[in-house]
Amino acid sequence: MAGHSKWANIQHRKGRQDAARSKLFSKLAKEITVAAKMGDPDPEKNPRLRLAVKEAKSQSVPKDVIDRAIKKSQGGDAENYDEIRYEGYGPNGVAVIVETMTDNRNRTASTVRSTFSKNGGNLGETGSVGFMFDRKGEVTYPLDVGDADTVMEAAIEAGAEDCETTEDGHRIVCADTDLNEVSNALEAALGESESTKLIWQPNMTTELDLEGMQKLMKLVDALEDDDDVQRVTTNFEATDEVLAQL
């Protein structure tokens, strides 16, 4: 899994910071609005909303933006978003999952399809690559919250399935249905997490060389540029040498 934990860091370093940041804020706000509309507007009574707010805070989304997104869900003019998952293959046969929230299914399907084909990939049927991933909960902490043993112990106590410590920080993985419970227990033991979210974790990977990684990043960047796309996950594997050259 060498490549996956470094993926976010590479993207972050790549820049377009301001534009990427405002896009990220609007995507996180959209998730908050949808979560609040589907359940209770109080994060304490709505686990999905609580996780969405937590993730937004970890990305430094201002409190007034979060409050506005929750308020928007209660107004009569709140848009209705459908959550649709697309699956396909990127360059070199890398599996790609694209999670979207859209108020226009036709527009989103057409944009996602053309983005795949323009960037050396192709959109598949639902389920075409899903079997290569497991749905999991992921909680991350910075290195300074404690050493690997301390965090591992807290993760085991919290009911997590796995815990790994790298130079980028501590990453704790649990069953998707346990994320709220596990993250609450970790928070009590270690304090506020850096990130808490549901992820698609690859259970099989595709090795890429430098050229393959560059092509894949082009596809992922193009997909993430679409306002309807919330998150893109791939199952690439790459050596540290390849990642260092990106």
Image (cartoon, grey):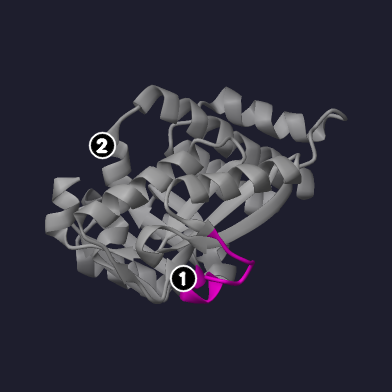
Percent position (x, y) of residue 119? Answer: 43, 47
Q: Is residue 35 or residue 14 the one in the foreground?
A: 14
Q: Which quarter shows the N terminus?
A: bottom left
**Which residue is pictured at 74% across the width and 29% down the height?**
71
For the residue labelled by badge 2, is the local secondary structure a helix, a strand or a loop?
A: helix
**Which residue is pictured at 25% across the width and 36% down the height?**
13
Q: Is residue 228 visible?
A: yes
> What residue does disc 2 label?
13
Percent position (x, y) of residue 96? Answer: 47, 60
Query: With respect to residue 133, does 123 lie above or below?
Result: above
Would residue 151 be found to the left or right of residue 244 on screen?
right
**In the image, what residue type sits under mark 2?**
Arg
Would residue 144 be found to the left or right of residue 156 on screen?
left
**In the image, what residue type sits under mark 1?**
Cys
CA–CA distance in space, label 2 to label 1: 28 Å
Q: Is residue 36 visible?
A: no
> What residue does disc 1 label?
174
Q: What is the magenta range? A: 123-135
Query: With respect to residue 64, does 32 lie above or below?
Result: below
